[in-house]
Amino acid sequence: MAMRTCQKIKTTVNVLGKFSLRDFSGVKNLKMSKWQEEKDKFLGMSLENKRELYKSYTQLKDIPTWQEYAKKESLAKKIAAKLDFTMDDSLNETLREKISLFQGDITKLEVDAIVNAANSSLMGGGGVDGAIHRAAGPLLLEECKSLRGCETGDAKISGGYKLPAKYVIHTVGPRGEKPGLLQNCYKNSLKIMLDKKLKSIAFPCISTGIYGYPIEPAAHVAISEVRKHLESHADEVERVIFCVFLPEDERVYEGALQSYFPVK
């Protein structure tokens, strides 16, 4: 009996030895199959069919460029910027058409990607984070579980599911005023945009809520990083939208944008 048992074990080992770990990867990924299947389905939908899911949306063509916005609004007094880079003023006319300032709900924007001001767990939370998860539906959380969290300043991408946006780029802002880490949020989000060949992106005011980053310096970090990115990659970008929720935040961005994308 003992010899027969040993023989069975030996046979089993020999059989298993013919397979690599790759052959068993499907077992590990079974839990992912549902969100992956649904993600592919949403990304493959026609625009007309997907619009049936979210009904209310704002198209990119309905969001004025900064050039158009500035002509219609009485802009706030220019906020002097202490630039940490040399700005190519010859690009101003072109780049003013690449950005927008929009006050409203980021979850309604029909763009390639919206950025989520996430926490490090990527499990959802309050503010913009909670609003994005609610609008996208529960499959967003399932995919976020597979991303295994995110470090402060880093960024990771997921599908948008029931959102008008195709993708969500999750980034974790710093707690308190830490310019280097906030710069990384924008740099890494824009890098994902570039790598994935996305043309339009919308940013919320990262870290300015319960994380306590003052809105004015945060706006300067955001806009300066976008300016630097566009100076090198304008041809790959259709639009970068600064999406603010509060009227007072809009006024801060109006002034700061005049420092980096001046309109006469």
Image: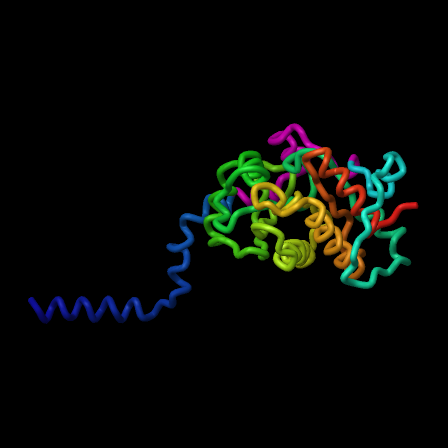
Q: Residue furthest left?
A: 1
Position of residue 250 relative to residue 5, above or below, is: above
> Across the whole image, how many numbered discs are drawn on residues?
0
Q: Is residue 139 above or below residue 54?
A: below
With respect to residue 240, does 135 lie above or below?
above
Please state, as top left, top right, bottom left or bottom right, where the C terminus lies in the image: top right
Residue 196, visible in the rendered structure: no
Q: Between 262 and 231, which is closer to the camera in this rendering?
A: 262
Q: Nearer the viewer, residue 155 or 251?
A: 251
The image shows residue 89 at horizontal and vertical percentages of 89, 58
Q: Position of residue 142 (x, y in %)?
A: 47, 44
Quadrant in which residue 187 is drawn: bottom right
Residue at 76% over, 43% down = 253
Q: Which colour scheme appears in the figure?
A: rainbow
Q: Quadrant of the N terminus?
A: bottom left
The magenta stretch spans residue 207:
no
Residue at 53% over, 38% down: 126
Q: Nearer the viewer, residue 140 or 180?
A: 180
Q: Position of 260 compared to 27: left or right?
A: right
Q: Position of residue 123 (x, y in %)?
A: 48, 45
- Residues rendered magenta in the picture: 38-62
**Is residue 166 left or right of 83 when viewed as pictured?**
left
The reply to whether residue 263 is in sight is: yes
Q: Who's the residue at 66% across and 46% down the image?
A: 214
Residue 166 location, quadrant: top right
Question: Mostly what secondary structure, the magenta segment?
Answer: helix
The verdict on residue 41 being magenta is yes
Q: Position of residue 245 (x, y in %)?
A: 68, 35
Horizontal side of 226 relative to 141 (left or right) equals right
Q: Quadrant of residue 26?
A: bottom left
